[in-house]
């Protein structure tokens, strides 16, 4: 079976994109200009980056790097942890999994240094996600298990729900789809009681992937449409492109090739605009498959060559 699925991975952190508060960008940038060089300014840099990360990721990365530079100057280790968590969220979006892992391992060490079990649990989970993205499942399980024990001791519903979704992703990668489905349903149940649409949309997307793997395509489409409504409402273009790719995969399996073209083209436009290289390659591959089906072999080859080059 040809598949073009894109898993959507969240970073697990209170100040990451998933928990961000949308703010007026102009007001925020004015505050940064007048702020003193202290830990409050680090937080302003982080907040600024969060306003851009799902539609202007390179701008977000610039603000996160400024937060890191100031944190190092101030010897503010918590600021460095926040930089890493937010910066690696963008790196994962762009497919830079090796770089993300290096930084997440640093964040675990920093969390141990400040002796904060909450930050340690989150950075352990983020590191587990980096290993999962690299398909190093034994290492992923090791970090997830250590983090999960800490999370269970906190009793925080939002963090537990997020942990359920991340475990859903782990078991998807390990092809244990029924176990993954179990964690996905738990995540959605918890998230419906929490006002965090991005996390809920992500859980729906990832649950849809499990339904695809179980060949329950109508259930998959229902999940993707739920998530797409959230992505469009919140202007989360990173999530939006994932959903277009995943919907394209459903239509490939249903042999609705006109819809495949529609969704892959939408995904390609956003991916190129946002420098989401992994997504761009998947969309190009999907369009190559479409043109192969309609027997336009020169165009199919062009798209395939572009995907391969990328």
Image (spheres, rainbow, N blue to C red):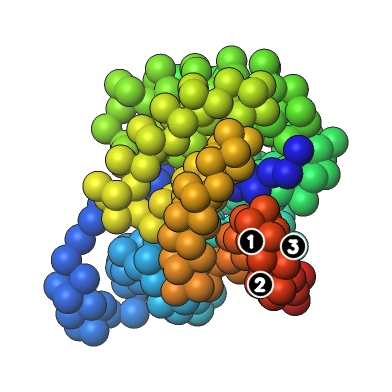
**Left or right, 251 with reference to 306:** left
Q: Residue at x 69, y 44 (%)?
A: 3
Q: Where is residue 121 in the image (x, y as percent from the top left)?
A: 59, 37
Question: Which mark is first along the chain, 1 or 2?
Answer: 1
**78 w.r.t. 301: above or below:** above
**67 w.r.t. 122: above or below:** below
Query: Circles 2 and 1: CB distance less than 8 Å?
Result: yes
Question: Which mark is first along the chain, 1 or 3?
Answer: 3
Q: Which residue is drawn at 34% across and 79% down?
A: 37
Q: Where is residue 43 in the image (x, y as percent from the top left)?
A: 34, 64
Q: Residue at x 44, y 66 (%)?
A: 270
Q: Can the viewer see residue 302? A: yes
Q: Which residue position is annotated with label 1? A: 291
Q: Which residue position is annotated with label 3? A: 98
**Helix, strand or loop at disc 3?**
helix
**Helix, strand or loop at disc 2?**
helix
Q: Which residue position is annotated with label 2? A: 299
């Amino acid at each position: 079976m040809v598949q073009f699925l894109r898993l959507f991975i969240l970073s697990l952190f209170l100040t990451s994109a998933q928990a961000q508060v949308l703010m007026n960008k102009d007001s925020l940038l004015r505050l940064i200009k007048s702020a003193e060089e202290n830990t409050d300014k680090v937080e302003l840099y982080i907040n600024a980056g969060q306003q851009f990360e799902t539609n202007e990721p390179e701008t977000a990365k610039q603000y996160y790097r400024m937060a890191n530079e100031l944190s190092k100057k101030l010897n503010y280790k918590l600021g460095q942890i926040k930089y890493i968590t937010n910066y690696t969220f963008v790196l994962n979006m762009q497919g830079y999994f090796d770089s993300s892992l290096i930084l997440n391992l640093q964040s675990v060490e920093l969390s141990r240094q400040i002796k904060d079990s909450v930050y340690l649990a989150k950075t352990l989970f983020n590191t587990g996600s980096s290993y999962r993205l690299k398909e190093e499942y034994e290492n992923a399980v090791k970090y997830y298990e250590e983090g999960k024990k800490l999370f269970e001791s906190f009793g925080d519903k939002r963090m537990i729900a997020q942990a359920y979704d991340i475990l859903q992703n782990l078991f998807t990668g390990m092809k244990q789809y029924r176990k993954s489905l179990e964690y996905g349903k738990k995540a959605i149940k918890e998230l419906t009681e929490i006002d965090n649409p991005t996390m809920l949309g992500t859980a729906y997307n990832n649950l849809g992937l499990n339904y695809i793997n179980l060949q329950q395509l109508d259930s998959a489409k229902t999940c993707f449409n739920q998530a797409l409504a959230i992505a469009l409402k919140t202007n989360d273009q990173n999530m939006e492109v994932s959903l277009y790719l995943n919907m394209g995969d459903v239509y490939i399996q249903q042999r609705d090739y006109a819809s495949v073209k529609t969704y892959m083209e939408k995904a390609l436009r956003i991916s190129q605009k946002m420098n989401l290289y992994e997504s761009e390659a998947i969309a190009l591959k999907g369009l190559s498959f479409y043109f192969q089906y309609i027997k336009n072999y020169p165009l199919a080859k062009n798209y395939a060559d572009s995907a391969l080059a990328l």
